[in-house]
Image: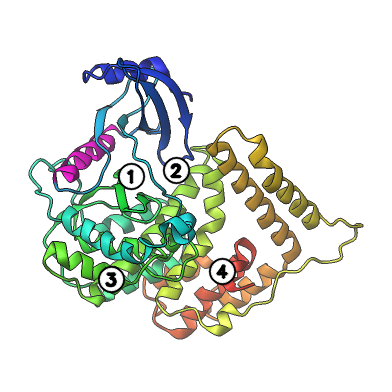
Amino acid sequence: MAVSSERVEQALATVGISVTVTGIHRLTAGASRETFLIDYRLPDDTSDRAVLRRDPPGHGQADRMRAEAVCLRAALKSNVPVPQVLCSGDDAPGIDAPFLIMDYVAGETLPRKLQRDPELAAIRPRLAAEFGRILGRLHRTPLSGLEILDDSDPLEALEATFRAQGQDNPTVEIGFRWLRHNQPNSRPITLVHGDFRVGNLIIDANGVQAVLDWELCHLGNPIEDLGWLCVPAWRFGGQAPVGGLGERDALLDGYEQEAGWRPSDEELGWWEIFGTLKWLVLSIFQSQRHLSGAEHSLELAAIGRRVCEFEYDLLDSLGMIDDVAAAGPAVRAGAGAYRRPSLSEILELVAETITDTGPALADDAHQRHQLRIAANLLRIAGREVDAGTAGAGELATALASADCETEAQLAESIRTETLDWADPTVQRAVAATVVLRLRVSNPRRLGA
């Protein structure tokens, strides 16, 4: 649903900002919020830009948007680099959802460019420590006025979110068991960003210019933010643990400079595992929004096929992926009864065509992003065609090694501790189910 220029002008006018909107362009959308770039002209005929964030129309959560605006204003007072909020509201005709409008901040957010752009070469080695210093300042933010924020126990909340979905997942069950058996002591609560990671940071040659996406802000253990930043999914192919850009020691050094104390390696490790499990659970939740019929979305559907990547991340972080589990057979095309090109070759050809010609046909970044997702799904479908029925046999063999017939039975046995989650036989069975799916969804993760 488009955003009305006139309504944006009226929303800004309510806080005394007079502009003429000259253009609105939808940026690549996240899975939960829509973002628009607004070009406008001021009364003195100078031009500027702003950014509008809104919930998807019909799926608004006004309390969370209000909390995001409160946190942005509080963080700014604590010298955290954030965009200035211009206005926000629960709804407005022509915007049609809870929203906020903030200053536009120039810089780079794309993780691969942050990892490789020569213009950022000088600042790149210093970013991990800068991330730590920013979080140290954020976590010293006074809590007065932040009573609107949720302060529930994050592990309890995460498990409740997972249970509410009614899904059976052995990897998730192992994650919960490990976290409860290894939980560290608590820390005094602070403001927690909740999604501080590469991709939500605007960076240029001078460093971090803005911290974005405060929709998950809450009160809690400050180390949660540090662990989340180190989650494997946010390394985007890089080897360095801190967003693919730096080392944990540099992150903690920077944090200690501003916060005045240093989390232990064990605490950071626990919260890194928590964050890895959290992203796995959230990816299941997001995919179910599409699979349940609640929200038709190519992006959410694609996340369903990426769940095995995040399962792999969790098991690998726990040391439960061994050489035997990871060394499965490669997926190869069978001859089939039909002449070439085979179905998988046709799907790959269509995917290549979309990849090569799509950017020239798409009018904006959101459309190009959708085409990239579509091409990837076609390639996944092709690999599944090539795999044939072999996966079903592998799955049955893996489950049988743990004396189970279904994944639901395996998950339930781990949850109720009928099976010991720490038993290497159980761990290998769970790892095998994840790896066989990963060979189809993203074989590059296995070096294939």
Instruction: Answer few, some or many: residues within 10 Å of disc 4's Cα (few below 14, many 20 plus, some between 14 and 19).
Output: some
Q: How many marks?
A: 4
- Sequence-first tag of 3 and 2: 2
Q: Amino acid at mark 1?
A: Asp
Please name the amino acid that badge 2 sits on.
Gly
Q: Viewer-proximal residue, 318 or 447?
A: 447
Determine which quarter of the picture holds residue 299: top right
Task: Write the residue at 39% across / 46% down.
Answer: 107
The amino acid type of the residue labelled 4 equals: Arg
Residue behind mark 2: 30
Q: Earlier in the sequence, mark 4 or mark 1?
A: 1
Q: Is residue 423 left or right of residue 299?
A: left
Compared with 28, 416 (above or below) is below
Label the magenta part by its dominant secondary structure.
helix
Q: Which residue is mark 1?
A: 213
Q: Position of residue 133 (x, y in %)?
A: 21, 60
The quarter of the picture where residue 262 lies is bottom left
Residue that carries the numbered disc 3 in the rendered image: 250
Tell me residue 217's x, y (percent): 25, 47
**Amino acid at dot 3:** Ala
SS state under label 3: helix
Does the CB distance between marks 4 and 2 fall below 8 Å?
Answer: no
- Kindly check if marks 4 and 1 are in contact, taking CB atoms under 8 A apart as contact: no
Color style of the picture: rainbow
Q: Residue at x 29, y 45 (%)?
A: 214
Q: Secondary structure at mark 2?
A: loop
Per the image, the residue denoted by label 4 is 445
Stretch of the chain drawn in magenta: 62-77
